[in-house]
Image: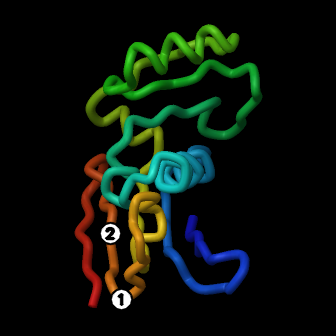
Amino acid sequence: MPVIVTDTASGILLAAMGSRAAGAQAQTILQVLLAMIDLGLNPQEAVDMPRLKIGGTRSTHPDDPIWIEEEMSTAAIESLIEKGHTIGDTLKRFGRSNTGQAHVIAKGNWWDIGASQVNSDVLWTGIDHRCDGKAMTY
């Protein structure tokens, strides 16, 4: 699932992202993008974050259990349970591919909330260790 991220005011290209994994694609892209926007993480940090997946491979319902990666913090799991979610399987090793694989190429450091200036000449990459992949930019 390819995604192009642009600045809403100027239309300037901010990033190209992609994900694969059937029903988890949109969830994966959303989690990576929110990690960059809300947490100020660079593309690699955002891709490396533990992820979760709601629902099965072919369909998703809001009441479906949430599958979590084994690196998910106890605090995050407890917060999900407090909000009424049911925790399903803990995904380990190859099973982690169920949360999707994401790759990102971002132009500039627009996610860095502490940066005084956005350097739009630098390309940043995030490559998912959940699958094979290499970063190549020029």
User: Which secondary structure, mark 2?
Assistant: strand
Mark 2 crowdedness (10 Å alpha carbons): few <14, some 14-19, many ≥20? many
Separation (CA) of disc 1 from disc 2 = 13 Å
Q: Horizontal placement of 34 versus 75: left or right?
A: right
Quarter of image, res 124: bottom left
Q: Nearer the viewer, residue 134 or 12?
A: 12
Residue beneath the point at 38% across and 21% down: 73
Q: Nearer the viewer, residue 46 or 37?
A: 37
Residue pointed to by mark 2? 125
Which dot, 1 or 2, sits closer to the camera? Answer: 1
- Where on the picture, by quarter, is residue 137? bottom left
- The residue that disc 1 covers is 121
Q: Of the residues shown, which amino acid type is indicated by label 2?
A: Thr
Q: How many marks?
A: 2
Q: Can I make out residue 91 in this image?
A: yes
> Could you say where residue 80 lies in the image, as x and y percent from the top left?
59, 17
At 51% across and 25% down in the image, what residue appears?
67
Rendered location of residue 12, percent (x, y): 60, 86
**In-image side of 46 versus 135 (left or right):** right
